[in-house]
Image (cartoon, rainbow, N blue to C red):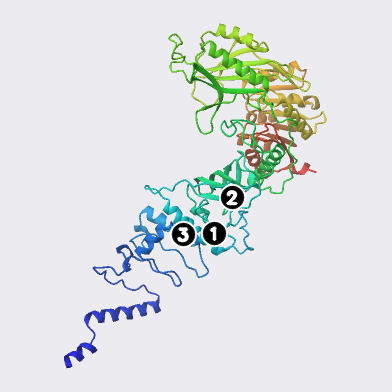
Amino acid sequence: MSEHKDKSTTPSRKERKLLTAKEEKKKNRGSGKKPAAPKRSAKPAAGASDSASAGSRPAQAPGDRPAASGAQRRLSAAAGGARGARGSSAGGSRPAGPRSAKPADAGERLTPAERYEKRQSERVAGAPVTGSTSGKPYAGDKGRGPTSGQPYAGGKVKAARTAAARSQVQASADTGAQGLPKPARPHSAAAAPGKKPYAGAGGAAARPAASPADAEQVKLGDVIVVTIKRIGINGEGVGYFRRKAVFIDGAITNEVVKAEVLETHEKFLKAKLVEVEKRSPDRVEPPCPVFGICGGCQIQHISYEGQLRAKLEIVREAFSRYANLSDLKIKPTLGMDQPWDYRNKAQLQVERRDVKGSKSEIVAGLYEIGSHEIVDISGCPIQHPQVNRAIDRVKSVLGELNIPLSKGDSRGGRSDIKDSGTRKGVRTIVVRSGFQSGEIQVTLVTETADLPRHEELIERLRLELPEMSGLSINVNPLKTPLIFGERTISLWGSEAMSDSLGDLNFTLSPRAFFQLNPEQTIKLYETVRAAAALTGKETVVDAYCGTGTIGLWLAPYAAEVRGIEIIPEAVADATRNAEQNGRDNATFFEGEAEELLPRWAKDGLRPDVIVADPPRTGLDRKFLETILRAKPKKFVYVSCNPSTLAKDCKVLLDGGYEIQSVQPVDMFPQTSQVEAVTVLVQKETAK
C-alpha cells in the first residue's frame, strides 16, 4: 500500500520532464525568451507533420496566428493561398509562413526559392483588404473603390473575401496535370451596353474568376475588371488594377472591361480584352477587315472626335509624366475634315504564295503584329486610292513577268519554272503619289542591283501606269528593319518626282523625306509659322530640315534661313527646291546641328529662332546643350513622339526656358500617332 502511495505522489521521470518543460515555458513567456525545443518524438502528434514539428516552426510574435500544421498548410496550398488574398484583418492576423522545414530566423540557410516565398508571404501578410498601397484598409464609402479609380468588385469586405477565396479554390480545382490553370471562360452572355461590372460574391462557376485582392497576386490567365482611364501612346487602353497599370489593346477611355492577364511585370500588367462591361459612346465598328492584325492602324474602333480627344490626352499625359507639368494648357487637336485616303506613300513588303487552283500569287502588305507574316492590305482605307491602284498594278506585272522576290521564292524565283533564276529579288514596293502633280514614283527595293527582265518590266509598267514619272531600284542587301539601302539606280524616267504644298513646288528623290499627309502638313507648317511670329528681321535655323520644307515655308517671313541635315541627298533636294521656288535667303548645309551651331556662333551668328523636327527618338543630348549655349529667343519643337518631346522639354525648362504653347496636330488619323508643335521661350522674354 505504501508502494502505491509513493507511486501516486512522487512524479515519474517522464512527468518531471513535462513539469520542467511547463515551468520553463512560463519563465520564457515572462522574459520574452524563446522556449527550448523539446526532443522530436518518434511519432508526430495527431494532425502534425514532420515538416511542421515544434523544432521547425518560426517564433510567433504576440497576437500572431500560430503556425499551421502540415495538413492545414496542404489545405491552404490547395486553396491557392486564399487566406493571403484577404490581407490584414483588424485582429492583426497574418497567413501562415512559407512551407519550409527551416527556422525563420535562419534566412541565410534558406534556398533562393524559399527566401522568395518568404518575402512574398510577408508582402501578402501586409496587403490591405481592398488593394490600397498605403498598407491600411480602404476607409472609403460603401462599395466605392480605391483612389486608383478601379471599381470595387464586392460592395462589402466580407463578400470580397468570400469571392476571392471561392475563385482561388475553383482555380485550384481547374488546375491541370502540370499545375497550369485552364484558360478562363468568358461570360455566357454578352454584356449589354452600360451594364455595371459584376459585383457579387456568388455565381463563380458561371463567371470568370474573381479578381485577386492584390495586384501582386495576379497570375497569367486571371480575368480582372478594369476601368479605362486613358489611351496610351500605342493606342492601347490604360487602366489600373489596385494601382498597378494595366495595358489592354482595344479598350477605350471610360469603358469598364474584363480582361485576361497575358503578362505580369513589377510595375504593370498586359491583358487581352475579354468583354466590355460598360461601353464607350466613342466605340465604332472599324471599316478595315484587317484592323487589329496588320498593325498599321491602332484606333479605328474609336470615333474621330474621340480620337482627337485621346491624342490631346496622350500629349497631356506625356508632359505630366516626364516634365511634371500636370496643369499645362494644351490647345485642342487640329484634325481633318475627311480622315481617310490621306497617305501619299506606301512601303509594302512582298511575298509570292501558292494558291489553290493557280500556281502562285504576289501579296503586298505589312508584317502582322509580333510576327514575320505579311498581311495583305490591298485597298487600305487610309492610303490614297491612286497609291492603292499603283501597288496592285506593280504586283500584277511582277507576277506576269515572274520577277524573283526575296520572300516566298525557294530559289529566288518560281519553284515550278526551271529558268526562274537563283538570285535574290524584290523585297519591298515603294509608291509615292503627288496629290497636286498627279505623278507616280515607283521604287523597288532589291537585294542585288541585277534585276532580271527589267526592260520588259519598264515597258509593262509604263502601259499599266501611264502617270508613272520614274522607276528606280534601291539596293539593300542587309537584314535590317530599314527599308532603303545607300544605293539608288534609276531604271527609267526622272530620278525625282514633283509635288507641291501651297505655293511651294518640290522635287523629291526616292529616299527624300516628305510629309505623308499633304492636307495636314499645310496646317502643321502654318502652326509653326504662327508660333515663330516672324517679322522679317529674324535669322532662323531649321535643324533636321530634311528636304527643306519647313525652312522654305518660313523663308518669306524671315531675313535668313539656314537648314541643317545629315543626309546628303536630302540637302541636295532642299537646295534644288530653294532655287526652284526663288527662296534666295534659304541655304542648306550638310552636317549635324550640334557641330554647325557652335561653329556659326564663333563667327558671330546668333539665331533668333531655331526650329527642330527630329525623328521619334527626339533631340540628341548634344543638340539640347547647344540650344542652351546658343540661347535663341524662341525654340519651336515639332515632334511626332510626345514622350521624347516632354523629356527634351524638361531639359530646356531646367535650362532657363518655359513653354509658351502646345498645339497637337493629327497628321495620321486612325493611328495613335500625334504631332505636336511646342513653343519654348527664354523666361525673361516670356510675357
Q: Residue 226: which disc? A: 2
Q: Which residue is mark 1?
A: 201
Q: Nearer the viewer, mark 1 or mark 3?
A: 1
- Spot occupied by residue 521 in the image (x, y as percentages of width and height): 72, 28
| Residue 200 visible in the picture | yes
Within-10-Å neighbours for mark 2: few <14, some 14–19, many 20+: many
Kind of element beneath mark 3: helix
Q: Which residue is mark 3?
A: 82
Kind of element beneath mark 2: strand
* Distance between mark 1 and mark 3 Cα atoms: 14 Å
Task: Residue lying at the far bottom in this picture: please name it.
Answer: 2
Q: Amino acid at mark 3?
A: Ala
- Report the residue at 44% width, 72% height from top: 62
- Spot occupied by residue 301 in the image (x, y as percentages of width and height): 64, 37
Quarter of image, res 334: top right
* Distance between mark 2 and mark 1 Cα atoms: 17 Å
Q: Earlier in the sequence, mark 2 or mark 3?
A: 3
Task: Residue lying at the far front in this picture: please name it.
Answer: 189
* Distance between mark 2 and mark 3 Cα atoms: 21 Å
- Spot occupied by residue 455 in the image (x, y as percentages of width and height): 56, 6
Q: Amino acid at mark 2?
A: Val
Q: Nearer the viewer, mark 2 or mark 1?
A: 1
In the rendered image, the quadrant that contains the N terminus is bottom left
Q: Amino acid at mark 1?
A: Ala
Quarter of image, res 544: top right
Viewer-side residue, 83 vs 450:
83
128 shown above or below 64: above
Kind of element beneath mark 1: loop
In the rendered image, the quadrant that contains the C terminus is top right
478 shown above or below 145: above
Q: Residue 192: which disc? A: none
Q: Are marks 2 and 3 in contact (CB under 8 Å)?
A: no
